[in-house]
Amino acid sequence: MGSDSRPAAARVSAMLVPATKSHLTSIVRIERESFTDPWSKEAFVGMIDSPLALFTVALGDHGGVIGYTAATSAWEDGEILSVAVENVARGKGIGGQLLDAAIFALKEQLVARVFLEVRESNAAAIALYKSRGFTQMSVRRSYYRRPVENALVMRLDLTPK
Ligand SMILES: CC(C)(COP(=O)(O)OP(=O)(O)OC[C@H]1O[C@@H](n2cnc3c(N)ncnc32)[C@H](O)[C@@H]1OP(=O)(O)O)[C@@H](O)C(=O)NCCC(=O)NCCS
C-alpha cells in the first residue's frame, strides 16, 4: 500500500515478548545499525528494570531478536520512545506489529493520546507512524544531535475502550 517504491516483501508474523536482559546484545546491535546517535546499553538496561516502561522485542523464526519497541506513559499521556527493526527484516510488517502492540498496551493503561518524536528526514518511520494514524503536531528545531536535525512531534488520539 502507499506510494513508495519499495519492492513488495512477504509479510511475516513475529512473536512479541517483553524484553529481558538476555535480549540486550541483539537490541544494542540493532540500535547501532539503525541510529547515528544510538542509545547506550545502560539506557536499555534501565528500561528493562523500569516498571513504567513497555519494552517489547520481536522474535524471528529462530528465536532471535529482530526488532523492539519501547513506550511509556504518565497518566493520560503515552510516548513511543523507540521502534527499530533489524535491516534485513524491514518492510515485512514487523515495525507495524511492534507499534500496534505498543499502542494496544498504552490503551490498556487508559492513555488518551500518544506522542513521539522523529527525525524529519526519516521517511520510513514517518510513513509507519502515519499508517497508524499519527499526525504531525509541531516541529522541534535542532532537537537531534549527530547529525543535528529537526524533530517532528507526532500525536495519536486514542478512542476510549
Ligand atoms: C521505521 C521502521 C521501524 C519500520 O519498520 P518495518 O518493519 O520496515 O515497517 P513495516 O514493514 O511494518 O511497515 C509499516 C508501514 O510503514 C511504512 N514504511 C515502512 N518502511 C517504509 C519505507 N522504507 N518507505 C516508505 N514507507 C515505509 C509503510 O507505510 C508501511 O505500511 P505498508 O504495510 O502499507 O507498506 C524501520 O525502517 C527501522 O527500524 N528504521 C530504523 C530505526 C528508526 O528509524 N526507527 C524510528 C525512530 S523514530
Image (cartoon, helix red, strand yellow):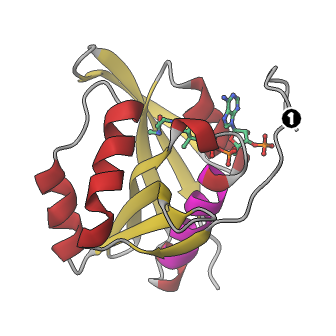
Q: Nearer the viewer, residue 26 or 2?
A: 26
Crowding around mark 1 (Cα neighbors within 10 Å: few <14, some 14 to 19, many 20+) is few
The image quadrant where one finds the C terminus is bottom right
Q: Please say whether residue 103 is one of the residues in the magenta stretch.
A: yes
**28 sits left or right of 111 in the view:** left
Q: Residue at x 72, y 65 (%)?
A: 13
Q: Position of residue 54 (x, y in %)?
A: 37, 72
Q: Please say whether residue 133 is one of the residues in the magenta stretch.
A: no
Q: Quadrant of ligand 1?
A: top right
The image quadrant where one finds the N terminus is top right
Ligand 1 lies under 8 Å from the Cβ of mark 1 = no
Which picture quadrant has residue 36? top left
Q: Secondary structure at mark 1?
A: loop
Q: Is residue 137 above or below residue 13?
A: above
Numbered range of the magenta stretch: 95-105
Look at mark 1 in the image and give the residue it sits on.
8
Q: Position of residue 38 (x, y in %)?
A: 26, 35
Q: Residue at x 11, y 55 (%)?
A: 42
Q: Position of residue 127 (x, y in %)?
A: 66, 35
Q: Residue at x 48, y 62 (%)?
A: 64
**120 sits left or right of 61 in the view:** left
- What is the residue that sits farthest to the left in this orientation? 42
The amino acid pointed to by label 1 is Ala
Q: Nearer the viewer, residue 92 or 145?
A: 92
| Magenta stretch, overall SS | helix
Q: Is residue 115 above or below residue 63?
A: above
